[in-house]
Amino acid sequence: MRSNSLLFSKPQEPAMYARDEEDTLDDRQRWSPATEDSVLGQNEAATPARTRWISKPFVRLLATNMAFGFSMSCFYLLPKHLTVTYAATPGTIGTVMGVFGLTCVIIVPWLGRAVHGLGLGRTIYLALLLMAASSFAFALLDGAGPAMLLLRALQGLATGGIMTAAVAMVCELAPANKLGQAMGLAGAASLIMSAVAPAIAEPIGAHYGFRWVFVMSGLAALIGFWIARGLPSHKAMTGKPSRVSISRRARLVLLSLALSGAGFNVVMTFLAPLAMSRGVRTVSGFFAAYTLAALAIRILGHAFTERLGLRRTAVLATALYGAAIACIAAVGPQSLVALGLVFGLAHGALFPALMALLFQDAESAARAKLAAFSNGVMNLGMVTVLGFGQLANHFGLVAVFLATGTLVAASAALSTSPRSSL
């Protein structure tokens, strides 16, 4: 910042240049050659520093994430719909839910190139349009057959595109020193819908049928499409994307994301069938508690996370995440909300920390590729429900939660390496 002192030692320069230079400084502060420190601008009151990086495009991205989050969260109730309406077995539920994640994984090699060719904004709003169309089509289904699998695959394609482009756009809009906070806020925007959507959709599905839940999902995606049309264009690039190597540290973070994603998807897929078998009639209380706890950590716990550091936060949150998943094996009417709170606390700290670690030192050219891989490995976790569904058919859902929780907790060791190797 010392070079900015030249700006104030040359009063003859036009004011417009001084203003432009001033606007590039964080918190509207100037470098003082007299005190060799940063001081408030002449028009600024002595108020706390403002986070000026939260710009209009970033707020629009948050609104887009909220609309997408509502659309996607409506399908958290799909396992309940399959259980109640079609008496589906855990194996069938695992197949329907797993094909979504399988699609997200299969398209990973092409996602980076697709985003590179379409541009970030265009990728997001075209994917939201696909999400809307597939959600409306769900309302026309009469059974858990091939058509449902095809629509879940299309939703996986849409979700892969949205999440990849949105994560890359966060990296473009937020400064490096605010990346962890930006990732947390972007995730929180969609996360809040994990409570709102099931709370609205579950009673509607019970009284009027799940067709209306799927219609709501489609409408939310259309709203997101309309909002996303105003996102920064980040124009498509000509030529081929450059080859970018992935460091050992990034590979370990991706592996941790994959295992944590497996735990998350096991909970989202098999919580409702297990809870209903124990007399729990509605599961929206779990989602509400999980969401509120995760939001509290992401919005209010940022200072605590910064004090701990990203690596320690990832270690502790991973261990707690695994323990919470294992404890869900004992879910019942009295413990549903409490388990949701613990699960949400761990979730709210874990994923922003891992994502910030992944992108912390990444070059701009590598961001789209890393975003595609991070989305792919997290959805690789959803593919595991294909196998876990068959495991549940033979050994029960309790065994699935205990095995998954133990595996996730053990993966905390991936984040214990020093920064130089992680």
Image (cartoon, grey):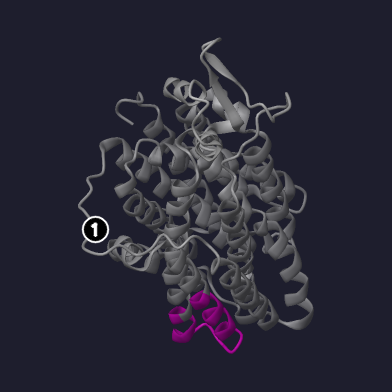
Q: Camera-side residue: 407 or 116?
A: 116
Residue 53 lies in what quarter of the image? top right
The N terminus lies in quadrant = top left
Q: In the image, what residue occupies the spot 52% across and 45% down?
A: 183
Please tell me which residue lies in front, 247 or 324.
247
Q: Quarter holding the C terminus?
A: top left
Report whether 422 appears left or right of 37.
left
> Magenta region: which residues?
129-150
Q: Residues within 10 Å of mark 1 (few under 14, many from 20)?
A: some
Question: Is 353 colored magenta in this rendering?
Answer: no
User: Up-down: is 383 above or below 13?
Assistant: below
Decide if residue 266 is in sight here: yes
Nearer to the camera, 1 or 334: 1
Residue 390 shows in the view: no
- Classify residue 42 by image quadrant: top right
- For this view, does 384 lie left or right of residue 251? right
Mark 1 — residue? 241
The amino acid type, in three-letter code, at marker 1 is: Pro
List x then y, in percent, for residue 252. Answer: 33, 39
The percent position of residue 199, horizontal first and vertical second, equals 75, 63
